[in-house]
Image (spheres, rainbow, N blue to C red):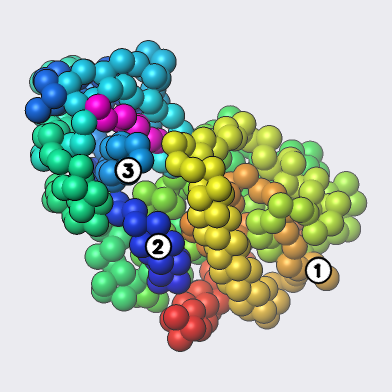
Amino acid sequence: MIKSLNILMKSIFYFLAFLFISTTYTFANSPEVTAVRIGGDENKTRFVLEINNDITFRTLSLANPNRVVIDLDEVIWKIGPGGAAGQGLINNYRYGLYLPGTSRIVLDLKKPAKLSNSFVIKGKGRKADRLVFDFERISQTQFISGLLTPELRIKRESDKERSTAYSKLGKKVIVLDPGHGGHDPGNLGGVKVNGISEKNVTISAARNIKKILEGSGRYKVIMTRDRDIFLKLRERSLVAHRNNADLFISIHADAFSNPSVRGATIYTLTEKASDREAALLAARENKSDVIAGIDIGDEDDIVQNILIDLVKQETMNLSNRFAGELSAELKKAVRVRKRSLRSAGFAVLKGIDVPSVLIEMGYLTNRQDAKLLMQKETHEKIGRAILKSADKYFTKNSAFN
């Protein structure tokens, strides 16, 4: 994630004396937790999750009352209801969605304990993998001091680690999100007027934009989809989370009842739409998926609200900063709307910690725009505008930090 967000998050968590103990294990596709097992006594206890896929996770300890929290990449829970009774050092456990992209398990401890070991036992044949956490009893003094001391790390290359490596090489990670796909064709206006499907335009444009960005040697580009498949809106933002993205750019083509309307528009996230047209567009795009609410988890409500609001506000500020750069460059490259910079509550942009914009490249209901949006040359113009704006954004942001 970009430096300013890291600084913001670190300062908040140090102030609250929280420490995340980072633990990684490679993840692919959507994993399922199929069973939970607990064994042991009040001196040593083992907590086991059965998972059908590789996973990235991290742990932290919290006091008053004593708890151990395990944060996972978002998973599908196929186990009994939370609040189940525990055993040994674990009094009970609860689980649920913590934030988009992150699932959380909270272990309430009977006695103070530390995580002494964690490892994965690969399942044989069709058996699930087992993610194992071993706990040992310690004194309350040791538990409190342990809140500030990293204890354990599992070393394994994950998408996030690879993205960090790109950052060390000077490459920023940009996620391109070609809108719609699969059984979701996007807006039907283009099909009715010009026989053009939005989902095909966006994937073609994204591929050409990716070539421009990666051709500079300064960016690693990841696409949420590289073929005609359907992805839920949350799955799209998860790609940015899992790859530690520095920017998320969702690519679309608009439609309007008035066929004379044409030109590109850039949208950023806000709680209140900048105008009625932006609100209607967001409502239409958000129908691609039903977005679940956020489970704030087990932390103090006031603290959680402060954390989320601060990070969300900082992310929106950074999104607006990039959108401003992009608007200026896009005007030089292609036709844009008179009000080219707008805002609304797009679900796909609600990534919280990833600066994000949504580009409507033009109107498929306008014959001139539709023709241009089918051309590689137009995609490359947009790609070069994104490249120039990204260069300026990261340069200025680096100087600011």
**Which is nearer the eye, 211 or 45?**
45
Query: Which residue is at the front of the view, 178 or 278?
Result: 278
- Quadrant where the image shows the C terminus: bottom left
Name the quadrant of the N terminus. Answer: bottom left
Q: Is residue 236 visible?
A: no
Q: Earlier in the sequence, mark 1 or mark 2?
A: 2
**Is-magenta flag for residue 126?**
no
Up-down relation of residue 128 to residue 367 (above or below): above
Tell me, yes or no, whether the highlighted magenta stretch contains residue 108. yes
Please tell me which residue is depicted at 88% across the width and 58% down the height of the picture: 260
Q: Which mark is residue 15?
A: 2
Q: Is residue 297 visible?
A: yes
x then y, percent, for residue 302: 55, 48
For residue 339, the mark is 1
Name the N-terminal-most of marks 2 and 3: 2
Question: What's the distance in space between the residues labelled 3 and 1, CA to CA?
Answer: 51 Å
Residues at circles 2 and 3 in contact by the CB criterion of under 8 Å: no
Q: Position of residue 131 (x, y in %)?
A: 19, 30
Dot 2 falls on a residue whose secondary structure is helix
Which residues make up the magenta segment? Answer: 103-110
Given the image, on which type of amino acid does mark 3 rest? Ala
